[in-house]
Amino acid sequence: MNLLPKNKLKNLKLPRHWEKNSEKNGPSGKPKPFWNNALSTIFIFLILMTIYSFLTESGSKAPVISLSQLATDVSGSLVSKITVRGDELEVEYLKNHELKKAKKEEGTALTQTLVNYGVPLAKLNTLQIEVKSESGVGFWILNLAPFVLPLLFIVVFIWFLSRQVKGAGMQAFTFGQSKARITFPSDKKQRVTFKDVAGCKEAKEELKEIVDFLKSPKKFLDIGAVIPKGVLLMGASGTGKTLLARAVAGEAGVAFFSISGSEFVEMFVGVGASRVRDLFKLAKSAAPSIIFVDEIDAVGRVRGGGVGGGNDEREQTLNQILVEMDGFEQNEKVVILAATNRPDVLDPALVRPGRFDRRVVLDLPDRHDREAILKIHAVKKPFAEDVNLSVVAERTPGFSGADLYSLMNEAAILAARENRLKVAQFDLIRSIEKVMLGPERKSHILSEQEKEITAYHEAGHALVASVLPYADPVHKISIISRGRAAGYTLKLPLEDRKLQSRREFLDDIAVSLGGYVAEKMIFGDLTTGPSNDLQVSTALARDMVTKYGMSDKMGPVALEGAGGRVLFGRGVDDREFSERVGSEVDAEVSRIMTEAREKAEMILKKHRKALDTIARRLIEVETIEQAQYESIIVAFGIMPKKKKDEEVKI
């Protein structure tokens, strides 16, 4: 692997706010608050004043006596020693070596003063008198400290203040510099390769050409080939776009600059464009390198639709990105990777040939890919002997790579919570439902009436799904609350599907209305339970009419875009069809829902005994697994099916 040469790493000129980040900022990279510095200064000042007070007080503990009293004590042979420090006298007595203080007259010798007070010369000859110089360090410290310490405090406080102001000024000067995070190829801890990315076979094949170009561009340039300047990674959230981009840099052994599209846009016009210029300049100085822009749709949306400063700034930033990508030379050896889950909103100039002219689609993983992803996330987790990741992969269709990571992590948490040292298969199965629906709400206890209503509701879903030929088979029924659902019916298809037919949609709508019909038929009333079912089924019926052309009356006409928006980017409130067409759409949606309700009602009336049996069993045990459920419906002449995932919840 060709790593970036050390001399290039040394010559790479990082922005000044990067170089001094570790000096000025704390461990988190955030600037130190000013008040932290001010409080530190005040704290140091208080400590110094405390020490000074201790020293001065310790020196003044001895009682002070007058000269006349001192003369009397000397005459009475009570004093053994007198220490003279300037005008200060330290008197040591014979009894218990007690110390007292006195002050002599200025400009007069101590012996002359004592003689003037009537002390006999014989007594003075027996008295020990010691004179100490006034030029000692301690003397000057004690005398100058009251003046020096406040002055020192003011100087230090002003220094901290100016340092903080200087830091704020530097932040103002670096406001237009790039905030990209850089990962060097020598950083082994953050290095990711294709081995760490399971699945995405076609995407990795497409990106291997980028890796080959960054490693050895000469063979491409010699034959006249120009590597794509930009690669757009498209896929749903959690499919591994960012991880795959890091793997490309890890495989090629080049510097990796990562930034989010939202980090370019500020409230000041021109800042985003300045950051784009700084980022590209930095990447060119570290070439070969990769620039990765995550969520590029934040800055790369279609231009011309907005008014105001925020949109003007975004459009100027996008214009600068377009200019920088056009300014690349053929041998620049800088590749831009961008990720988005909304490619339909990107500006056409951004995805034209010469810019992001290579698009790599990352789909949700299939069963084999899910098993491979689970194995990667299972490397550092101790498993029990009964763990079968293939079974877990079969029960998680529609899960993204991020969902599978969360599943493995939740399983480990469940095992640790129960003080077990290994993760069991039971933990993995429970974590599937936790990721899909949320944790069990054990404190959410239903009353007897609510429990009966919920049981019939879920039994209605399950029974309609078992009878309809194009509905997925039931895998589990439960009336234990999870997340926002009071109960749920889990269905698992037999194989992963990329396409779904009109018949399957119609059966799914009928299954969604099974709980609604069961409540109305059994209790003669309705609750708020079917609200989510009605929302999901109505939205699906409208999509059939407006997106998929599955209405015989409306014909093969697409009236809305894939994201629920109107086509051609005219905004959510604009309509591409007339009021008459809108009325016909509403009528078709109502017809589909009515037919589905009648279909579900006919099934539940025909199999009323099976419905009652399933509901009673749910009330008793609260959860019915697949084998037990199939034994119940077989007793009533309903043959079970085998299929894979989807839940209907209330």
Image (cartoon, rainbow, N blue to C red):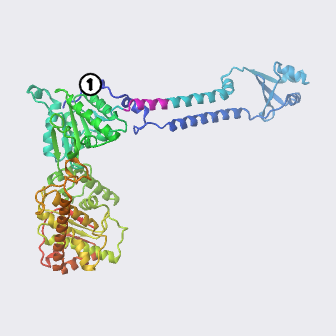
**Could you tell me residue 208's position as x and y percent?**
14, 37
> Is 336 on the left-hand or right-hand side of 32?
left
**Could you tell me residue 18's position as x and y percent?**
36, 31
Q: Is residue 221 magenta?
A: no
Quarter containing the N terminus: top left
> In this picture, is 580 found above or below 151?
below
The residue closer to the viewer here, 285 or 501, is 501
Tag 1: residue type? Answer: Lys
Residue found at the far bottom of this picture: 609
> In this picture, is 279 found above or below 559?
above
Q: Which region shows up in magenta?
A: 163-175
**Could you tell me residue 459's position as x and y percent?**
22, 73
Our reading of the magenta stretch's main secondary structure is: helix
Q: Quadrant of residue 461?
A: bottom left
Density class for disc 1 (Cα within 10 Å; few <14, some 14-19, many ≥20) is: few
The residue closer to the viewer here, 357 or 591, is 591
Which residue does the image show at 19% across and 72% down from the upper left?
A: 597
The residue closer to the viewer here, 37 or 356, is 356
> In this picture, is 256 found above or below 534?
above
> Is 562 on the left-hand or right-hand side of 44?
left
> Is 626 on the left-hand or right-hand side of 169?
left
Q: For numbered disc 1, what is the local secondary structure?
A: helix
Question: Which residue is the site of mark 1?
Answer: 8
Q: Is residue 394 visible?
A: no
> Is 448 on the left-hand or right-hand side of 167?
left
